[in-house]
Image: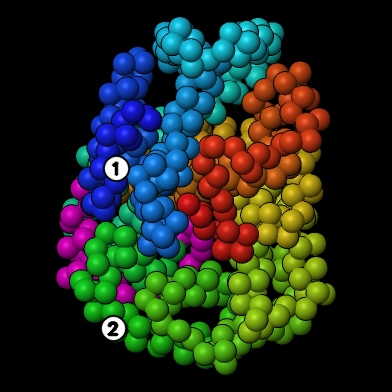
């Protein structure tokens, strides 16, 4: 790489061409080390490599851009192959031997790998856990690509409005794995552009897994087309303003009586830049003590209870939820946490949606220790495999299955991106033989802030990924 950069021009030039030049060079180098070309090209297509406007000033030269953006991906490529080698997944032995022969891996490191492989041979259940864990991405991508035709046909239904919620959920999974370029969403793009009156409506029975129609349309329009140019955005803003008035008139306490409706309303106003006044926000977050009694809270879904706390946290500068009511909600949520997993209702079923929101809530409140004894990874991963087995992409596709798949992925994102002692211990206990897990748990250096890997973060209030 040093020799390569010595030959590169340091003049200002198109960053896209510069990155492509570096990627082409690295791809050739990795292929010579027996790495698969498709795998390397996919890694170098990662969203992390895009330079955001706020990063430009901190990345002034090709070498600095390489160090900050590309080196973390290179380390990740090596790490993934080493982990695959430990799990006997894929034909990684020749790559490890090649890396050893070329001096990339010291003999001491190779001996340690052999010692860990020996421990896995004595702990077959941990080896199976590791294999299942590292195959999740490939299994989901394979499932979606195998059903590419069926997914794209959903756009061709006589009434696409009926499937807008399903297409929204499918798109969330597709985007999670950066598969947008593989699928042709042109028909839904045309539908969104030409039929705004059909999707700019609010429907009853809104839940987090059954999103409001106008929200699905607005979200997909923002992702697939130019929301500012291709959609009459003033019409969307007017619709949201009218919806606000309806919510105030219809509900005494909108944030409790229509939690999901208010949540999607807030997210939509942000997308179309419709800024509410503090007075308007206060009316949506109006508090009535009667609605915080146990008999009322127990009828709300776990995810709804968390969303209430999340909204108040985001908007605490406008309306603050007093400690007593916050405690009442948290006490109700904790009644849904059991050794079997996290339930949507006290006597309900274990759900990845509920698991994600409770995991996020404890991250938001810095109380992840409360979940330390739960085997959440086993529950989430087993549900991913179960749902992949039974999901069928057709006009009758079950929204809950796609939603649960998405929330399962979001759970794993939290485990991977929340760099805390608690989440690392969860991963260690699930993935590694006891001797390795104990060593990790006893280490005082569980998080390496200066490590050269990527450190994707999760916003502690919004839950958004920070690249």
Q: Residue 235, which numbered label?
A: 2
| Vertical order, 149 against 329 (above or below) | above
| Front position among marks 1 and 2 | 1
The local secondary structure at tag 1 comes to helix
Number of numbered discs: 2
Q: Foreground: 389 or 35?
A: 35
Closest to the observer, 188 or 293: 188
Q: Residue at x 57, y 32 (%)?
A: 382
Q: Is residue 247 left or right of residue 174?
A: right
Q: Is mark 2 on a helix, strand or loop?
A: helix
Residue designated by label 1: 19
Scheme of colours in the image:
rainbow
Image height of 466 relative to 254, above or below? above
* Image x and y of residue 76, in percent: 48, 31
Chain part drawn in magenta: 183-210
Q: Residues within 10 Å of mark 2 (few under 14, many from 20)?
A: few
Q: Which of marks 1 and 2 is nearer the N terminus?
A: 1
């Amino acid at each position: 790489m040093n020799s390569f950069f010595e030959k590169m021009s340091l003049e200002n030039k198109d960053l896209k061409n510069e990155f492509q030049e570096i990627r082409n060079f690295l791809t050739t180098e990795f292929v010579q080390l027996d790495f698969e070309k498709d795998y390397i090209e996919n890694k170098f297509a990662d969203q992390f490599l895009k330079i955001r406007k706020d990063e430009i000033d901190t990345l002034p030269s090709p070498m600095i851009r390489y160090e900050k953006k590309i080196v973390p991906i290179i380390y990740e490529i090596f790490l993934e192959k080493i982990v695959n080698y430990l799990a006997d997944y894929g034909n990684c032995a020749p790559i490890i031997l090649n890396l050893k022969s070329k001096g990339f891996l010291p003999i001491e490191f190779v001996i340690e790998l052999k010692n860990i492989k020996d421990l896995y041979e004595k702990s077959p259940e941990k080896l199976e856990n590791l294999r299942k864990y590292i195959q999740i991405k490939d299994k989901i991508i394979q499932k979606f690509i195998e059903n590419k035709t069926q997914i794209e046909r959903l756009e061709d239904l006589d009434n696409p409005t009926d499937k807008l919620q399903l297409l929204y959920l499918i798109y969330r999974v597709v985007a999670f794995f950066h598969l947008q370029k593989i699928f042709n969403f042109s028909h839904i793009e045309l539908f969104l552009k030409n039929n705004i009156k059909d999707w700019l409506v609010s429907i009853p029975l809104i839940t987090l897994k059954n999103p409001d129609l106008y929200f699905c349309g607005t979200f997909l329009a923002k992702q697939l087309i130019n929301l500012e140019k291709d959609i009459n955005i003033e019409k969307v803003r007017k619709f949201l303003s009218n919806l606000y008035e309806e919510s105030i008139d219809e509900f005494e306490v909108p944030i409790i009586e229509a939690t999901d409706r208010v949540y999607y309303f807030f997210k939509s106003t942000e997308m179309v830049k419709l800024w509410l006044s503090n007075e308007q926000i206060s009316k949506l977050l109006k508090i009535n003590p009667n609605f915080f009694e146990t008999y009322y809270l127990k009828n709300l879904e776990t995810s709804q209870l968390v969303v209430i706390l999340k909204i108040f946290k985001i908007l605490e500068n406008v309306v603050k939820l007093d400690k007593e009511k916050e405690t009442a909600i948290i006490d109700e949520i904790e009644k849904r946490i059991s050794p079997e997993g996290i339930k949507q209702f006290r006597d309900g079923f274990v759900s990845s949606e509920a698991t994600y929101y409770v995991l996020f809530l404890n991250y938001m409140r810095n109380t992840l220790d409360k979940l330390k004894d739960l085997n959440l990874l086993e529950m989430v991963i087993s549900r991913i495999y179960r749902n992949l087995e039974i999901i069928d992409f057709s006009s009758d596709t079950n929204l809950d299955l796609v939603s649960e798949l998405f929330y399962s992925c979001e759970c794993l994102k939290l485990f991977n991106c929340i760099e805390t002692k608690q989440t690392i211990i969860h991963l260690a206990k699930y993935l590694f033989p006891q001797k390795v897990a104990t060593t990790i748990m006893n280490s005082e250096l569980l998080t390496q802030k200066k490590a050269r890997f990527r450190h994707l973060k999760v916003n502690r209030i919004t839950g958004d990924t920070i690249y």
